[in-house]
Image (cartoon, rainbow, N blue to C red):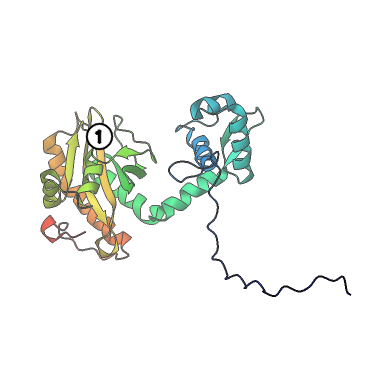
Amino acid sequence: MSNLPRPSARRAAPRAPQPDAPAPPLPATEAEPSGGVIAVTRALQVLEAFALGESSLSLAELSRRCALHKTTVLRLARTLAQSGFMVQREDGDWRLGPAAGWLGARYQAGFDVQNVLEPALRELTHATGESAAFYVREGDVRTCLVRVEGPQALRHHARMGEGLPLDKGSPGRVILAFSGEPGKAYEEIRKKGYHWSIGEREQGVATVSAPVFGMHWRLMGSVCISGPASRLPAEKLETLAQTVMAAATQLSYALAGNSAAPAQSPVRATRWHP
């Protein structure tokens, strides 16, 4: 007799194809409760540690500002340097690299800063004698995308790219109003087509702002002039509001791709729609 094993009388049924299993979650050391990635968040912390006007920072200072160990910051900095976002100087300190500047330039290019915004703001500064700026909404804050300083020796300085509250200061309130924010105060802004404030976000600073739209009435941001409250009392702001609204209207047509903007006053709230 053969010693070979006897074949089984019953053959196993073929398995049905299984659906693709979901990707396994990141390890606890790499994932954040919000669903983000800790390594990416920390790398952004390192980039954001540089304040306006700071050309370089030591590893120890980066570590202190980011509340991270030096070895962690060094590893992140070296990784960012591989893509040009950071550069290590000969003395060992770190500075932002060219890729960081190029990223900012690409962000600004989305709003046609060079061809549209800057010339319009320069014209507004010339007409009012005050600094002019264009603000956009980024989530729950507003940021200054581009700014043109006025000719006055005493003027208000704003930092481009800094996140500022939407509910303090005329640029943010205009953005909220024309984003459809409910409330009597915002309804009044929509009715007038502009808003001014004195010392609301920063003591001694006065601003007046108007909304800027793109194609299909999509809100792009707000244009604003600012200066010391001593030079811009309420009566002066009311007068300058007409100039700011006219500039906002011209900007709206330019950003929408229509250079033939009408000469009449900006659209009032009764004809405004989000």
Image quarter hosting the C terminus: bottom left
Q: Is 71 displayed left or right of 189 in the figure?
A: right
Q: Secondary structure at mark 1?
A: strand
Can you say whether 151 is above or below 134 in the image? above
Image quarter hosting the N terminus: bottom right
- In front of the other: 32 or 64: 32
Q: What amino acid type should be assigned to the residue bearing mark 1?
A: Gly
Q: Position of residue 221 (x, y in %)?
A: 29, 51
- In front of the other: 219 or 207: 219
Can you say whether 189 is above or below 265 in the image? above
- In front of the other: 129 or 183: 183
Q: Is 57 displayed left or right of 114 in the figure?
A: right
Q: Is residue 122 visible?
A: no
Q: Position of residue 125 (x, y in %)?
A: 28, 44
Direction right: furthest residue: 1
Q: How many marks?
A: 1
Q: Is 174 displayed left or right of 143 in the figure?
A: left
- In front of the other: 188 or 26: 26
Residue sitting at x 20%, y 52% = 180
Residue position for label 1: 227
Residue sitting at x 35%, y 43% = 144
Q: Quadrant of residue 273?
A: bottom left
Q: Quadrant of residue 14?
A: bottom right
